[in-house]
Image (tube, helix red, strand yellow):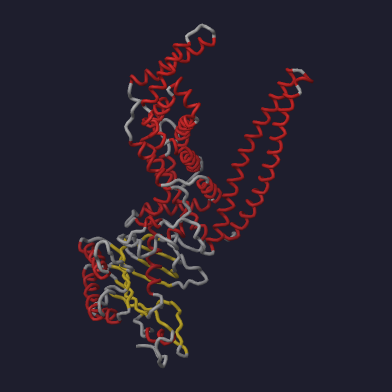
Amino acid sequence: MLKPEEVYTGRSKHFAFLVKTKKKQLKRIALFRLMAFIAAIAFLMMTNYFGTFPGITGSFVSVMIFLFFVKQYANTGSAKNHLELLLEINDLELKALNHNYNAFPDGKDYSDPAHPYSYDLDLFGKGSVFQFLNRTTTKYGKDQLAKWLITETINKIVIREKQDMVKELSRKLDTRQNFTATGKQYMDSEEDTDNINAWLSEQDKYFRNKLIQLILVVLPAITITSMFLIILNTGFFNLFLLLFLTQLSISGSQIRHSNRTHELIGKRLEILKKYSRLLSYVEHEDYSSSYLLRMKENLKTNLETSTESINKLSNIISAFDTRLNILAGFLLNGVLLWDIQCVSRLESWKSQFGKNVHKWLTDLGKFDAALSLANFHFNHPGFVFPEISEKTVFEAEKMGHPLIMANERVDNSISIPHEGLFIIITGANMAGKSTFLRSAGVNFVLAKTGAPVCASKFTFKPLALFSSMRTTDSLQKHESYFYAELKRLKEIIDKLRKGDQIFILLDEILKGTNSKDKQTGSRAVLKKIIEKNGTGIIATHDLDLAGMEKYYPEAILNKCFEIGIHEGKMFFDYKLIDGITKKMNASLLMQQMGILEGSGKSEH
């Protein structure tokens, strides 16, 4: 089986060749198009030599050939653009395999320091888990991927269904990349989604008004009839002029509403065409996983599929856009009440399908987000899908942080076989405590999304996750760092008091106070957590805190990261072992950096 980098390299070369081929085709088509245009002019100019009929006929045929090549050029150009995007996708994936994923949106807008764990685990922002995973091309997809990452609890059955979905989509490389390339052709924004939702929620003005519907039929019909009568030289020009000016006046009186509707939905034409093309990947592909089959079924109505419905809407909007041509808008509104006709047709569409749009686009977002998880699985075939347990809270073998490259990552194993057990990890500065905590937290989050995790084996119980690792102060709320941390710890205690089942990650708590106060307070916090049957991991420099194991042997287990010292120099192996650390390194670090002078012996 080929490695991901071999697959992407091969596809990159393949698409580069196809792009080159399409560019050559475009040049040939452009040449044929020019020749057809010249031929059309030449035939017209030679009517004096060959006669009117042969000249006009030749010119007409040349124009038809010219239009054929115009269409061919547009289609080939569109195919070339799609291939260029496929080439770009594979080149970016090659970079991503080397952990260069800066080209992907980082989701910083989803960052929330008050969230139970996302801020501590760097789920959003530059170099984040979201940026590492994200391959979405719709606003709905980005929102859904973020939602999956920050959902506190989730149903075990849903996790298993999502695992099956991710596995299936991971095998559909062509579908995934074609979907992404299609989505990249026109990126939507929050403004687009807000305007579509605003239009959907607006009350109908014309469609349900019987008088307006009668006027929309009668006035244009009489106007068109008067036009034919004028052509037949039977008079009626004054009637036509009166009707024309009347319809212009009616259209003008409704211009504000027409403009608002066009602003909300008319300018979303390319976005809606994109949604239609993307939804077709869900509707027309064969799937076996229950999550995808449900999604596919949701896109059907009693009338027609989501793709057909949105194509209808796109056609109405395309017709509405004719108003952007001043002359066409003037004539169409004078003859057909064009703006009001189009707004009425939009309202008619909305009455039939509007209630389904949110469901369709939500499912589109889920599919888009699922492709990101499938891409993650494809890129990391060595990562495993977690097993879900009713008892074991957290058990991992050879677990590492997925954002650390494999050749630099040090994997560790850990087991929390039941609730009510707290692991205390001690160790020197830079020995690996915080990285391990984040590795545990990130993999726990990935497991709940239905994604594979960075481990050789992983079992977990999908509890709510809560952490206190990187508390921030708030100038706006006049809160100190210490007060913010106390609030965080209170949230944890309150959840335990209510009987909530949570998995807790703590990193050097009560950092904002003096050492004696910190020691006393940390012991009190951990004691309260143990009394409430709390479960989790705490990393600390406080060896006194680790001493609590002898008072609570059933509830506390000590682990540590040790440092090695050779000829006065430190080295780290980042391996988690049993027991309490025996070496601290603050003085030695300062000596090595030239801040202090000393013998080079470590603190004990």
Q: Give coordinates of residue 74: x percent, y percent.
A: 61, 38
Up the image or down, 33 lies above or below 57; here it is below
> Can residue 22 be seen by looking at this rendering?
yes
Classify residue 297 as left or right of residue 154: right
**Rendering coords of residue 160 (x, y %):** 40, 54
Q: Quadrant of residue 70?
A: top right
Say if 335 sits above or below 148 in the image. above
Q: Residue furthest top?
A: 234
Closer to us: 466 or 162:
466
- As drawn, the residue found furthest toward the right would be 49
Q: Does residue 130 lie above or below 594 as drawn?
A: above
- Residue 511 position, x and y percent, is 29, 74
Location of residue 46 with respect to 170 vertically, above or below: above
Specify the quadrant that holds the N terminus: bottom right
Q: Tell me what residue is drawn at x 59 percent, y 49 percent.
A: 84
Q: Nearer the viewer, residue 163 or 338?
A: 338
Total numbered badges shown on the rendered structure: 0
**Place of residue 7 in the rendered image (x, y in percent of width and height, measured from the top left):** 59, 57
Viewer-proximal residue among 164 and 19:
19
| Residue 324 located left or right of residue 153 | right
Quadrant of the image for the C terminus? bottom left
* Left/right of residue 524 with respect to residue 578 in the rendered view: left
Q: Quadrant of residue 431?
A: bottom left
Q: Is residue 75 rendered to the left or right of residue 282?
A: right
Is any part of residue 294 visible from this angle? no
